[in-house]
Amino acid sequence: MPATTSLPTEVDQLLQRLGVARAHYTGGTLAVRSPITGETIAHLPQTSPTEATAAIARAQAAYVAWRTVPAPRRGELVRLLGEELRAAKADLGLLVTLEVGKVPSEGAGEVQEMIDICDFAVGLSRQLYGLTIATERAEHRMMETWHPMGVVGVISAFNFPVAVWCWNAALALVCGNAVVWKPSEKTPLTALATMAIAQRALARFGDAPEGLLELLVGQRDIGEVLVDDAHVKVLSATGSTAMGKAVAPRVAGRFARAILELGGNNAAIVAPSADLDLTLRGIAFAAMGTAGQRCTTLRRLFVHDSVYDALVPQLAQVYGKVQVGDPRAPGTLVGPLIDRAAFDGMQKALDESRALGATVHGGTRVESAPEAFYVRPALVELDAHAGPVLRETFAPILYVLRYESLEQAIDWHNAVGAGLSSSIFTLNMREAERFMASNGSDCGIANVNIGPSGAEIGGAFGGEKETGGGRESGSDSWKAYMRRATNTINYSTQLPLAQGVKFDV
């Protein structure tokens, strides 16, 4: 059952165990509330624009020193970070639950994801490579080399408040870069805790330069400082498409590099041959987990006419029975929405759906604390792929439509701006292969017999189209954090020119 200790007290105790100084979360102007009860749990001092610029300058100086450290040695720091995260997993996972409202297994799972990416990055630290390139000139050698970029800026969203930083930081560090992090103003406490954990890793490492990992606490204006600073050579941002559309042009305007992982209006197709028991379980987690507030949340479901009446009524039953409430209570699968704005956005989308003639199951508020927003997940049956189904609403809404042909389902699937994650449930190899082919799903992730999700560690997690096209994992993900150079070495006494050019002097 939920703890009897008050939430602010429990958060304070957690932060103390994690090593965060009280001065970092008391007496400030940034009020942090827990979506579990709606109450304020901390007041953080905010970083000023001047302080943000100074932090970026420190990171730049750290990068200048760090880039000359051998990559396997840089990997040692990330290995130590993974160890410290393992030791703090239970406390940091619980803090994620209290600040974001995730059920405990999801909070702990997010920390485990941080640990896993550290393991992955440590391996990569010994695999940063170049190529020998064929050259037309005798006694010459041409090669490709890779070098650190500089300062990597990270802007993260509330729904994955700590994993996103680690995806970027672990790779950026082994690649020889410094990292400056601007977390969501809704979830700065988990960021403070993560930095305290990272400081312990830095202390054990011993000789990392000061400023290698910096944290900026504040609102949008502080994020803009990070976006616009010329020292920030790579800017990784996760969040809404609207945020990405604001960030990307500014980063491009100064010819820096952007890695964008934006929200997704993700879909799944249920084919006639689908294992319906597996499908039901896959849909339930994908659509309702984290109260529908994941970037990979399942938001659109296309069900073949032949299995619609067998699956959708069962799905409606699951939606009606799933336990909604305090995420700390045993059996709870759906916790709170992050805030009132999320609830209002959900209700607006449902009202629009009803106006189009949709049948809406659920979607009503579950009474709790006045400032907490618990809501039953909504299952919306539509006749047309139109209206709110074409937009992402960051809430537990699943739009369901019948389809007749796979081509029709794929056309609907691809007819939205987002292209993050997708899936098909089928036991037909031809249908599975068609979905994953170049004329199938247009998403960065296309899965079979599992819901739309992020890739496992080592997979290329990222989107296409309006979801940004960024990559923060995958076998060559390190290349996003490094710059490429081509070197030609002449070990002859001659100076032949390429393409047969003559220039005798």
Image (cartoon, rainbow, N blue to C red):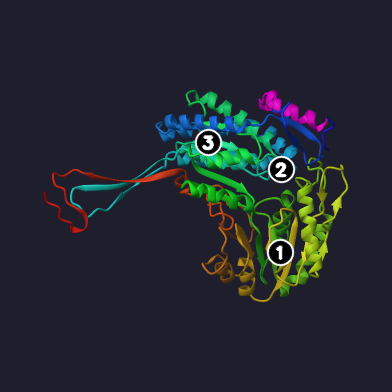
Three-letter code, disc 3: Val
Magenta stretch secondary structure, dominant = helix
Which one is nearer the viewer's eye here, 501 or 476?
Answer: 501
- Spatial separation of the CA atoms under disc 2 and disc 1: 30 Å
Indicate which disc, 1 or 3, sits on the residue closer to the N terminus. Answer: 3
Secondary element under disc 1, as helix, strand or loop, is helix
Identity of the residue drawn at 56% across and 34% down: 82
| Span colored in magenta | 6-24
Three-letter code, disc 1: Val
Q: Does the magenta stretch include residue 334?
A: no
Secondary element under disc 2, as helix, strand or loop, is helix
Q: Name the residue under label 1.
A: 389
- Spatial separation of the CA atoms under disc 1 and disc 3: 37 Å
Identity of the residue drawn at 77% across and 47% down: 337
Q: Examine the image and state in which quarter residue 501 appears.
A: bottom left
Q: Mark 3 points at which residue?
A: 179
Q: Quadrant of the N terminus?
A: top right
Three-letter code, disc 2: Ser
Q: Name the residue under label 2.
A: 105
Disc 3 crowd, CA 10 A, few/some/many (<14, 14-19, 20+):
many
Q: Position of residue 478 (x, y in %)?
A: 46, 45
Left or right placement of residue 344 versus residue 173 in this view: right
Indicate which disc, 2 or 1, sits on the residue closer to the N terminus. Answer: 2
Indicate which disc, 2 or 3, sits on the residue closer to the N terminus. Answer: 2
Disc 2 or disc 1, which is closer to the eye? 1
Q: Can residue 252 be seen in this view?
A: yes
